[in-house]
Image (cartoon, grey):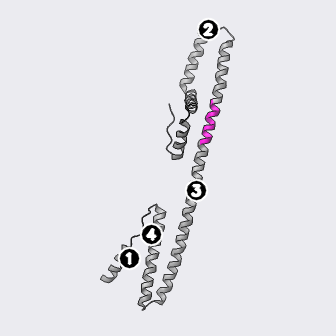
Amino acid sequence: MRPPKPINPALLKHAAQREEFAQNRIADAITAFAGSMAFVYIHIIWFACWIGLGVEHYPFGLLTMIVSLEAIFLSTFVMISQNRADTKRQVLADQQWRTVQEEDDQNKQLLSLTRQILALTQEVRGYAGLAKDNHEQNEQLLNMSRRALALTMEVHARGTGDLRTPSSDRGAAHDQKEDDA
């Protein structure tokens, strides 16, 4: 039975690179077979037939030599398998590190956008207190509100992975609602 194929893109790439070389494919096949119950059953049958049919007399020198050589080679394949597992772990660790770095960069960008929103909000509150009857200041307040809305939408889009740009029609729709009222 073959192990399941990886679904992680980094492991898929690693497996494809490993399969490029015939020696890796052979080592993988031997390791997979030697780690199976079929291997155990074949050896039970082989040893039983060797001893039962009297191929060799006790102390079974030839059988001992064959089994010793097999053990030497199998231990080598076990080490190859362990090295392969270590390489897979390293591939995963490298990919996780890159992901952490990307997330850190995104967090820094979101923090910067959040600070900009806070500054705009404070600026809007400052103008709101001063601009009760002044139309020009009201226009500035409306423009700053639109920028704050655009930044808020950008933060939301980055946080959810939705990279849509805010629509300029939203401000126009808001203006239309105010004109209707």
Residue type, label 4 = Met
Provide the residue designation for mark 2.
Answer: 55
Task: Answer left or right for 172 relative to 57.
Answer: left
Determine which residue is flagged by label 3: 100
Viewer-nearest of discs 2 and 4: 4
Tell me the kind of residue under disc 3. Val
Magenta stretch holds residue 78: yes
What amino acid is at disc 1?
Gly
Of labels 4 and 3, earlier in sequence is: 3
Q: Pointer 2: residues within 10 angstroms few (<14), some, or many (20+)?
A: few
Judging from the image, what secondary structure is the residue with disc 1 in? helix
Q: Nearer the viewer, mark 3 or mark 2?
A: 3
Is residue 100 found inside the magenta-colored segment of the image?
no
Amino acid type, mark 2:
Val
Answer yes or no: do the residues labelled 3 and 2 have beta carbons within 8 Å?
no
* x then y, percent, for residue 156: 46, 66
- What residue does disc 4 label? 153
Which of the numbered marks, if any, corresponds to residue 171? 1
Q: Residues at badges 1 and 2 in contact (C-beta under 8 Å)? A: no
Residue 160 in picture, x, y percent from top left: 46, 62
Where does the magenta region start and end? 77-87
Give the structural element (helix, strand or loop) at label 2: loop
Residue 9 drawn at (x, y percent): 51, 46
Residue 181 can be seen, yes or no = no
